[in-house]
Image (cartoon, grey):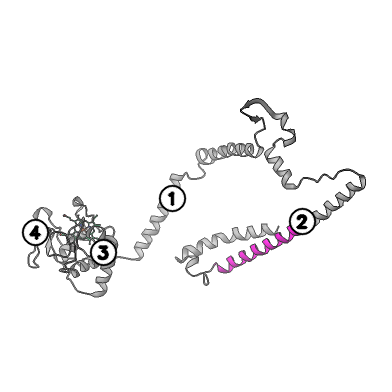
Amino acid sequence: MKNKIVACLIFALLPLGVQAQEATTKTFWDDPVNHPMTPFYLVIALVAIVTILILVVAIMLLNVLNMFVRKAAEERAAKLGIPYVPEPSWWQKLDRKLTDAVPLEKEETVLLDHNYDGIKELDNHLPPWWKWLFYGTIGWSAVYLVVYHITDSMPLSDQEYQNEVAVASEKLNKLRASQPVAAIDEAGLTYTADEALILKGKSIYISNCASCHKNAGEGGIGPNLTDEFWIHGGGIKNIYATVKNGVPEKGMISWKPILKPEEMRDVAYYILSIQGTNPPNAKAPQGTIWKEEKAAPADSTQAVKPATASL
Ligand code: HEC
């Protein structure tokens, strides 16, 4: 009865927990002391501890009781002058019921007549626990068929996935709508050695770009970003445009769908901040020397999109 009440409590409060978690992005482990569900969890833990204690005491009492019952039975057997045969415990009874194995002393009744180098075979029944499980799976398959394929009352895994994607993209849209991205004036973009922005750009660079351009910008799969040679033009506008549009045919993706405009600007600031740092193991120069006055990119086949392109 007590357990039922606890179960009801848990089921009644579960949706509360789910809502509370959705409302706050903090999980329980971020701040266990102030989490709204903490009192509830404490009550559950307390109930669990008390239940375990009650069970332990009950088992101990039962053992003592058993001892008295056995003593009495032994005395009765001694008085009647018959040998004492202990009653099988509930566990032994259950084990017998579940396995239906023929006891050792009666094994000859199920012994088959073949014998391979002393290895003999017993013709025991299939264990009932196994058979019940098997019948259970047959029953389950019928329920499954009706629920998932005939009445379509529950979604199949594929549909479940689609539903989750739909819910997630709705959330994403809401989040995007609540955080409009700041537009960057690409045409008027100028380089400012703002330390805070350059630091931000550096962390964006390390996590997104260093795999190809290497940590110090010395170049690897991608070109050296610290020298004055540029394939697609140097200067803040060209670098911003290269990062934004990428050079997909050469293996550099467009970062527009991944980075916010201000993040692309910050990473471009960072690249300009490491100009001329001359890191070790620098990759050989690619492209041509960039001079700020020169408007067109060096390689005319790799035309840079106009810096005024909309975001
Ligand atoms: C998968 C590898 C890869 C990643 C990741 C990558 N790049 Fe590149 N990047 C390249 C390649 C390859 C080129 C050369 C393209 C060409 O040859 O035209 C390039 C070119 C560039 C250029 C132009 C260089 C020039 O000489 O004109 C810039 C600027 C640049 N990358 C910045 C970035 C930034 C910023 C990031 C991170 C947001 C980044 N790259 C991430 C591979 C990569």
Magenta region includes residue 47: yes
Instruction: Judge depth for marks 2 and 1 and give the one in front.
Output: 2
Crowdedness of circle 3 by 10 Å Cα count: few (<14), some, many (20+)?
many
**Real-space CA distance between mark 3 and mark 4, rounded to the nearest whole angstrom:** 24 Å
**Real-space CA distance between mark 4 and mark 2, rounded to the nearest whole angstrom:** 92 Å
Q: Position of residue 253 (x, y in %)?
A: 23, 54
Magenta region includes residue 102: no
Residue at mark 2: 63
Residue at mark 1: 163
Which quadrant of the figure shows ligand 1? bottom left
Q: Which mark is residue 285?
A: none
Residue at mark 4: 298
| Residue 182 appears in view | no
Instruction: Judge depth for marks 4 and 2 and give the one in front.
Output: 2
Q: Secondary structure at mark 2?
A: helix
Q: Locate residue 92 relative to residue 159 in the image: left or right.
A: right
Q: Which mark is residue 205?
A: 3
